[in-house]
Image (cartoon, helix red, strand yellow):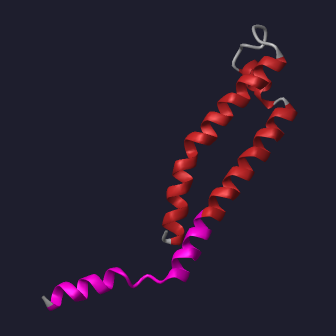
Amino acid sequence: MKRFFFSRNTVHQKDAISGVMSGLGALAVEITYIVFMVLLGINLFRRGAYYELFTRAGEGNKISRQAANVIGSLIFFVLAVVLLPVVKIVGKKIFGG
């Protein structure tokens, strides 16, 4: 019986301050990732980097610059959203959330 009480007390040793700090740290990692991805996507769109990728792949004659930038932006957005859970896991691992 004594053993049960000790195991129960060890579970609740995490205090509120460390819980809030770990949550804020993980949130800061997620916000940094989202801001970085938005700025990178805007930069690539403005430079026309997506059209350059299509022309290097040999599709330059079949697609316009605007269509390539829209398709490239959609692909970039999907990749950024797919990687977001990975960033959440890494942020929780770093800050112990």
| Residue at the image point whose x is 80% and y is 31% from the top | 49
Residue 91 percent coordinates (x, y):
55, 62
Q: Quadrant of the N terminus?
A: bottom left
Is residue 17 inside the magenta stretch?
yes
> Is residue 90 found left or right of 1 in the rendered image?
right
Q: Nearer the viewer, residue 78 or 65?
A: 78
> Is residue 27 found left or right of 67 in the rendered image?
left
* Res. 45 image quadrant: top right
Is residue 8 inside the magenta stretch?
yes
* Res. 10 image quadrant: bottom left
- From the viewer's perspective, is residue 74 above or below residue 33? above
The number of numbered discs placed on residues in the rendered structure image is 0
- In the image, farthest residue toward the left: 1
Magenta-highlighted residues: 2-26
| Residue at the image point whose x is 57% and y is 45% from the top | 83
| Residue at the image point whose x is 62% and y is 34% from the top | 78
Q: Nearer the viewer, residue 11 or 94?
A: 11
- From the viewer's perspective, is residue 75 above or below residue 56? below
The overriding secondary structure of the stretch rendered in magenta is: helix
| Residue at the image point whose x is 55% and y is 82% from the top | 17
Residue 70 percent coordinates (x, y):
76, 24
Residue 13 percent coordinates (x, y):
39, 85
